[in-house]
């Protein structure tokens, strides 16, 4: 007969085995979509007139790819969140449901959401303004999705810390109870 902890861990591992391939697939799709948005360089960068000769221009690539890469920052952070989610699911799949360290991975998902929000709100607008204007003041943009991402990130980090502490105490209580029995 299995105890409630083991049965719950087994059920969680079964669900994680189903969800992890989905997270990995979404990660791969996200990375491919980001690469598709960022990597293609206009053909004109391979046929730039420099000193009277047509040749490849690194400056052209920076001007074309730079803004795309800047704007891809939030998507990269969110794809990173998918990677952290699959790492969390892997730990659960391996039976580490009750490990406080597993909750740290959950907290990293929150950090990814905050990174996406900060990049969207502050870094992207500022860097794009610098690229377009060759300098300028700090720029920022704040809207409901950005605030929501940041809020969810903060809440996930807080939940991960609380659950990590709860699991640590629960593990100690279980260990004490096992010694008594």
Image: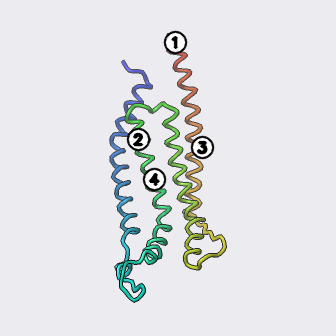
Give above or below for 40 relative to 95: below
N-terminal of the pair, mark 2 or mark 1, is 2
N-terminal of the pair, mark 3 or mark 4, is 4
SS at mark 2 in the image: helix
Q: Which mark is residue 158?
A: 3
Q: Nearer the viewer, mark 3 or mark 4?
A: 4
Q: Which mark is residue 80?
A: 4
Q: Mark 1 sits on what residue? A: 179
Between the residue at mark 3 and the residue at mark 1, the CA separation in whole angstroms equals: 32 Å
In this image, 41 relative to 179: left or right? left
N-terminal of the pair, mark 3 or mark 1, is 3
Residue contact at pointers 3 and 2, CB within 8 angstroms: no
N-terminal of the pair, mark 4 or mark 2, is 4
Residue at the image point whose x is 49% and y is 72% from the top: 67
Between the residue at mark 3 and the residue at mark 4, the CA separation in whole angstroms equals: 19 Å
SS at mark 3 in the image: helix
């Amino acid at each position: 007969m299995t105890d409630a902890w083991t049965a719950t861990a087994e059920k969680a591992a079964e669900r994680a085995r189903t969800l992890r391939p989905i997270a990995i697939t979404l990660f791969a799709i996200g990375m491919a979509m980001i690469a598709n948005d960022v990597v293609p360089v206009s053909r004109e960068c391979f046929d730039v007139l420099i000193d009277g000769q047509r040749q490849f221009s690194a400056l052209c690539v920076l001007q074309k790819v730079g803004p795309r890469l800047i704007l891809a920052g939030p998507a990269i952070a969110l794809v990173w969140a998918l990677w952290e989610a699959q790492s969390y699911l892997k730990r659960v799949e391996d039976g580490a449901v009750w490990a406080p360290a597993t909750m740290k991975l959950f907290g990293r998902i929150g950090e990814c959401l905050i990174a996406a929000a900060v990049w969207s709100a502050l870094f992207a607008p500022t860097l794009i303004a610098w690229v377009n204007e060759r300098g300028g003041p700090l720029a920022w943009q704040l809207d409901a999705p950005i605030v929501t991402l940041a809020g969810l990130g903060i809440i996930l980090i807080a939940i991960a810390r609380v659950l990590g502490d709860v699991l640590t105490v629960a593990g100690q209580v279980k260990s004490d109870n096992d010694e008594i029995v």
